[in-house]
Amino acid sequence: DAGITQSPRYKITETGRQVTLMCHQTWSHSYMFWYRQDLGHGLRLIYYSAAADITDKGEVPDGYVVSRSKTENFPLTLESATRSQTSVYFCASRSGTSGSLGYEQFFGPGTRLTVL
Amino acid sequence: GQQVMQIPQYQHVQEGEDFTTYCNSSTTLSNIQWYKQRPGGHPVFLIQLVKSGEVKKQKRLTFQFGEAKKNSSLHITATQTTDVGTYFCAGQSKAAGNKLTFGGGTRVLVKP
């Protein structure tokens, strides 16, 4: 049971390059999320998806693009990476129908991204 | 928008002592969840509180949800080195579109 996986685990890129972080879950959870974690800011929501082909902005969406063509995958793309996007990125998923409350989130192992 | 704040940001605890971390929301919550993140790891769900004034225990950890459902606390008794990590509270409400809003976390360091 793989659960939720992220790739790559570590990535170094340069300013201006496009970077895609992958997230895959095997539970068929309807909801998936992308967070970034920076010292002093906790976990901030970038984008989330309630189901395939349904995505919505979170707290800090600028500079990021997401898609969800399949339930199990939720890639996050940095269209033109900036140094301020250096961070640890966590993908998460949870079960539950649209609008439901109270389901725990399961987090992937994270991707540590450095933008030079 | 909804904001969730945690204090303290850092907690240095002598092994064997107790401590408490607090979580406060700017809006009334439907539920609150607590997560633990070990150093170098990812957040892992600990517990969820739903009812006003609810208290739940997990061994040495006691979680409480305030009467007004705007604050919560985590109390750890007889701290052990295995308690090292960052503890996050995360609030959820219909007003915020059912998204989890995480607090900044309390990073716990244990002195043996």
Image (spheres, coloured by chain):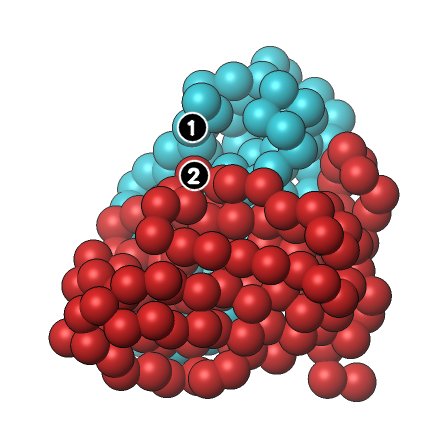
Chain colours: A red, B cyan
Quadrant housing the N terminus of chain B: top left
Please state the chain letter of the residue tagged with numbered disc 2 in the rendered image: A
Q: Amino acid at mark 2?
A: Glu
Q: Is residue B66 left or right of residue A31?
A: left
Most foreground residue, A41 or B108? A41
Residue B75 screen position, x and y as percent: 50, 45
Please state the chain letter of the residue tagged with numbered disc 1 in the rendered image: B
Q: Which residue lies most toward the top here? A: B68
Quickly name the residue at label 2: A59
Q: Is residue A115 left or right of residue B16?
A: left
Most foreground residue, A113 or A101? A113
- What SS does tag 2 mark? loop
Q: Is residue B43 left or right of residue A93?
A: left
Most foreground residue, A43 or A28? A28
Q: Is residue A67 left or right of residue A29?
A: left
Q: Quadrant of residue B55?
A: top right
Q: Quadrant of residue B29?
A: top right
Quickly name the residue at label 1: B3
- What SS does tag 1 mark? loop
